Amino acid sequence: MIEFVAWVILTLSAVTLVVALAEIYGVEIAIGIFATLTVVANIIASKLVTVGNIIVPAGVIVYSATFLITDVLGEIYGKEYGKKAVVTGFFANIIATLAIVTAILWKPAPIGIETAKDFKKVFGLTPRIVVASMVAYIISQTHDVYAFHFWKEKTKGRHLWLRNNASTIVSQLIDTCTFITLAFYGVVSNNILIRMIAGQYIIKVLIALLDTPFMYIATFTWKIVSKTSA
């Protein structure tokens, strides 16, 4: 568990640093990193890891970090930039999927036949998993953008920690329930399905709580950059 927390903090620190650079060089950097993380999360999700006794995909940390980015975008730049990030990530995943499928179907060179077999094992895409992932992504990420601004209006711009966690925690529940249900309903028993949802959601909530300090760091650096450039 300590190792897991360390990886989460390292990832969130890197993401926060990128957001700080975006405040200096342009918001497009943050949107680009958001799209990159969504693609990476789907690629490395084929590796299963354990956090305590809970089995989760290796992409759980980087994907959870994307919710931090949309919240920061919403807080600093406004709802429209959060929506742009979600749309950018969606199309980035479609293009990545097409590229991976093309690479798998492409006839390998004679000296690369064995490597091609390993490549297919690692990057082979199950259509049901892909569809489940994309549906869960667009619903949960869109909810996160709108929920963040809903709570911002309700709190009149106060209590950043509340809107950050309220939007992310509910969005992660939507994402987890949607993906696992669409991907595995009928494949595993309902009991196992519920355990999969509960286990992954617990980990995602833990990451959401850990990202709160980084939300404050990102907004604080933005204020400093704004004053410096004014």
Image (spheres, helix red, strand yellow):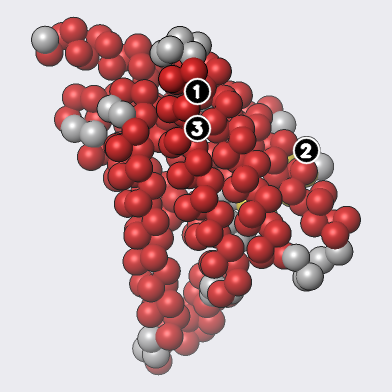
Q: Amino acid at mark 1?
A: Trp
In the rendered structure, the answer to whether residue 74 lies left or right of residue 205 reads: left
Numbered tag placed on residue 147 in the rendering = 3
Could you say which disc has been placed on residue 151 in the image?
Answer: 1
- Write the residue at 29% across / 37% down: 81
The one of 132 and 153 positioned closer to us in this rendering: 153
- Residue 52 relative to residue 14: left or right: right
Mark 2 vs 1, N-terminal side? 2
* Residue drawn at x 54%, y 31% as measured from the top left: 167
Which residue reaches farthest front?
A: 154
Q: CA distance from mark 2 to mark 1?
A: 33 Å
| Image-quadrant location for residue 157 | top left
Q: Which mark is residue 52?
A: 2
Q: CA distance from mark 1 to mark 3?
A: 6 Å
Q: Image check: 8 left or right of 142?
A: right
Q: Quadrant of residue 219?
A: top left
Residue in view at x 60 percent, y 72 percent:
128
Q: Amino acid at mark 2?
A: Gly
Vertically, is 45 above or below 215?
below
Task: Give me the C-alpha separation between circle 3 and circle 2.
Answer: 31 Å
Label 1 close to label 3 by CB (< 8 Å): yes
> Residue 191's x, y, as percent?
88, 56
